[in-house]
Image (cartoon, grey):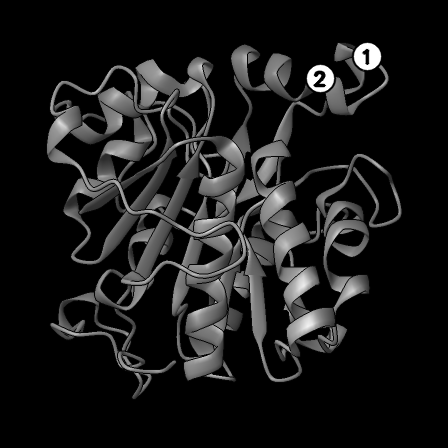
């Protein structure tokens, strides 16, 4: 696990976007797992900027989002379909046929979950999974007590999660009670995981996830088991880490990429879906 601390939320989001961009440049048909939420908004803004100003090409990229609410149509402003179209997909040159989110309106939700797993497998597995972390430590909507080997499934949302997401809805009682989420096991099969967390309100749960014991009560501790995981934090989110001085503080220029990002992200080029096969050096090392 690599922990990278940036001075503020803007620089942390920039570092995360630069990681994604470098991976996409090296593997134009990258299979990219995506997350939603306020933490991700500046990351998508940065990627849109790179597409428009630097020609970052998403035309062959394939994406799989972590989750979607049950009962919300794709055109509902509270849905993650809507979020992704508004914040990202409609603003870059990605083929919408290559973008995937669970269908929260499916008549057979169990079948939808099984089909989502099949779609991921048919794409060769996820190369880079982008993650946020909930205040209760969830990844996607894998709430506390989620099994580490769990697959894409229905998940009842906790009170904390619904309250955390309430600002995105007219009122708390409009926040759905259930969602489809990739399972923890599904997430751990990604060749590389990249988690971004910012803000003092995340400091306690970030410390538990990184330095605490493995526990199903904090889903994000499962990332301790992943052979290729990078965690990007701002100083506030890193504020409760006991080994704070041990972690890397990499200077990311305001108008450029991290100079040594290529040492921190490893994705297999040959499409092997075995996380244990992640190489010692990233396949795109040395790309300018």
- Which residue is located at x 33 percent, y 54 percent? 193
- Which residue is located at x 16 percent, y 74 percent? 281
Q: Dot 2 corresponds to which residue?
A: 166
Q: Answer whether labels 1 and 2 touch (C-beta < 8 Å).
A: yes
Q: What element does badge 1 sit on?
A: loop
Q: Position of residue 130 (x, y in %)?
A: 45, 52
- Which residue is located at x 81 percent, y 51 percent? 86
- Which residue is located at x 25 percent, y 52 percent? 229
Asked if residue 127 is positioned above or below residue 81 in the image, the reply reads: below
Is 239 left, or right, of 105 in this rendering?
left
Measure the alpha-carbon separation of dots 1 and 2.
6 Å
Q: Nearer the viewer, residue 247 or 23?
A: 247
Q: Is residue 201 visible?
A: yes
Q: Which mark is residue 171?
A: 1
Asked if residue 108 is positioned above or below residue 237 in the image, the reply reads: below
Q: Nearer the viewer, residue 272 or 107?
A: 272
Q: Position of residue 13 (x, y in %)?
A: 51, 44
Q: Position of residue 81 (x, y in %)?
A: 75, 51
Q: What element does badge 2 sit on?
A: helix
Q: Position of residue 146 (x, y in %)?
A: 34, 32
Quadrant (top left/top right/bottom left/bottom right) for the C terminus: bottom left
Is 210 left, or right, of 57 in this rendering?
left
């Amino acid at each position: 696990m690599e922990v990278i601390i940036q001075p503020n939320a803007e620089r942390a989001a920039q570092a995360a976007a630069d990681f994604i961009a470098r991976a996409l440049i090296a593997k134009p048909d990258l299979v990219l797992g995506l997350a939603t939420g306020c933490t991700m908004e500046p990351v998508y803004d940065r990627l849109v900027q790179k597409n428009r100003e630097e020609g970052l090409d998403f035309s062959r990229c394939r994406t799989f989002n972590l989750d979607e609410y049950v009962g919300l149509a794709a055109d509902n402003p509270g849905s993650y379909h809507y979020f992704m179209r508004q914040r990202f997909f409609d603003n870059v040159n990605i083929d919408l046929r290559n973008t995937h989110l669970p269908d929260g309106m499916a008549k057979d939700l169990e079948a939808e979950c099984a089909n989502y797993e099949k779609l991921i497998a048919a794409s060769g597995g996820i190369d880079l999974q982008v993650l946020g972390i909930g205040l209760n430590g969830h990844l996607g909507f894998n709430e506390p007590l989620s099994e580490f080997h769990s697959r894409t499934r229905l998940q009842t949302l906790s009170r904390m999660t619904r309250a955390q997401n309430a600002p995105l809805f007219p009122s708390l009682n409009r926040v759905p009670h259930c969602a489809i989420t990739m399972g923890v096991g599904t997430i751990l099969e990604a060749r590389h995981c990249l988690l971004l967390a910012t803000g003092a309100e995340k400091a306690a749960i970030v410390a538990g996830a990184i330095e605490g014991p493995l526990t199903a009560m904090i889903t994000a501790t499962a990332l301790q088991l992943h052979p290729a995981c990078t965690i990007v934090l701002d100083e506030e989110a890193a504020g409760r880490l006991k080994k704070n001085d041990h972690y890397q503080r990499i200077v990311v220029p305001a108008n450029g990429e991290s100079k040594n990002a290529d040492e921190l992200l490893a994705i297999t080029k040959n499409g092997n879906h075995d996380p244990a096969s992640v190489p010692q050096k990233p396949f795109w090392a040395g790309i300018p």
